[in-house]
Amino acid sequence: MLAFLARRFVTLLLTLVAASIVVFTVLEVLPGDPALLMLGTEAREDTLAALRSQMGLDRPAPVRYLDWVGGALTGDLGTSYTYKLPVAQLIGDRLAVTAPLALLALALSTLLALPLGMLAAIKHNRVGDWGVMGFSQLGLAVPNFWVGIMLIWLFALQLGWFGAGGFPGWGAGWGGALRALVLPATALALTEAAILARVVRSAMLETMREDYVRTARAKGLSKGAVLRRHVLRNALIPVATIIGLQFGFLMAGAVVVENVFTLPGLGRLAFQAIAQRDLIVVKDVVVLLAAIVVVVNFLVDVVYAVIDPRPKQAG
């Protein structure tokens, strides 16, 4: 097991290094002037020169890369050109919105997908199965931003149960803050629930075909007892892996939904930084999102190694 986890950890580090090199190269090394891109073609030459000096563009690229990585490891991500604030502070403030949003969406998708997937497996090739698979196809086909717009129209504009957007901040109270996250979390959760329900269905159907399940039934155990003791427990191993991966994707993929609901999250910060040509913020946010996905993948591997002995034996 230790060898397995060591290999995964080395892979994590190499992936992070590769991602940082790619982002740095695209934004600062490829042909073009980052300062000119940020300020526009109408900028004066002395202003451009000042920004180039501020960004360290007059130094060799390897030196700038090492300084950037070193600063990131110590928490110094630079200063935003647009907001005139430390990027670390901006990211910390936005993570306080995106992380709870992703967790709430993950919880909703799991609560929805598990019973639906189980129903589809138990009612295989019957009406219940067809209904769940139809929901799954619809959830995969409909983009989450459209779902978000429909949720705003129904629950905010027509029924008035929720606000149409915005975020009051955690300082205004947990109730109001969580209430503002319900609709965007639901918009994100439906797509993930559609994926997860299919995984639960497939995992349960595969487990139900195993010899030990047939043996348990032959020994006289009821169908419900077999499902609880044998099928569900073993089927949840691949499902737990997908749930972990979905959290990373939700963290990195909430850009559009955060803009639909005007949430001041990490995705909206990235969108605004791109629109305002704030390359310093773009660089840090993109690498952070990549790091979140990679680290979550590593943690999923750790959990999988703990709950399933096969990776340990292979390692």
Image (cartoon, rainbow, N blue to C red):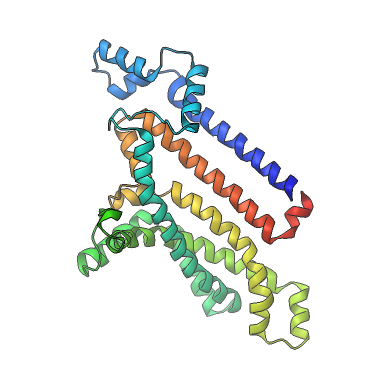
Which residue is depicted at the point 46% across and 39% down?
288
Left or right position of 72 against 241: left
Residue drawn 31% across the image and 12% down it = 49
Q: Nearer the viewer, residue 208 or 291?
A: 291
Near-viewer residue (210 or 103): 103
In the rendered view, tell whether residue 141 sits above or below residue 4.
Answer: below
Find residue 251 and report its horizontal and vertical position in percent: 44, 49
Image quarter of residue 100 = bottom left
* Left or right of residue 66: residue 306: right
Q: Residue at x 69, y 70 (%)?
A: 207
Residues 40 and 90: in front is 90
Tell whether 161 sits left or right of 96. left
Direction from residue 94 to residue 74 in the image, left or right:
right
| Image position, residue 96 (x, y; %) | 37, 49
Quarter-wise, where is residue 214 in the image?
bottom right
Q: Quadrant of residue 83?
A: top left
Q: Is residue 267 visible?
A: no
Instruction: Please name the residue shown 66% across and 44% down the image.
Output: 8
Compared with residue 203, is residue 256 higher up or lower down, i.e. above or below?
above
Q: Is residue 125 visible?
A: yes
User: Residue 41 placed where, x, y %?
Assistant: 27, 18
Q: How many marks?
A: 0
Q: Position of residue 212 (x, y in %)?
A: 77, 75
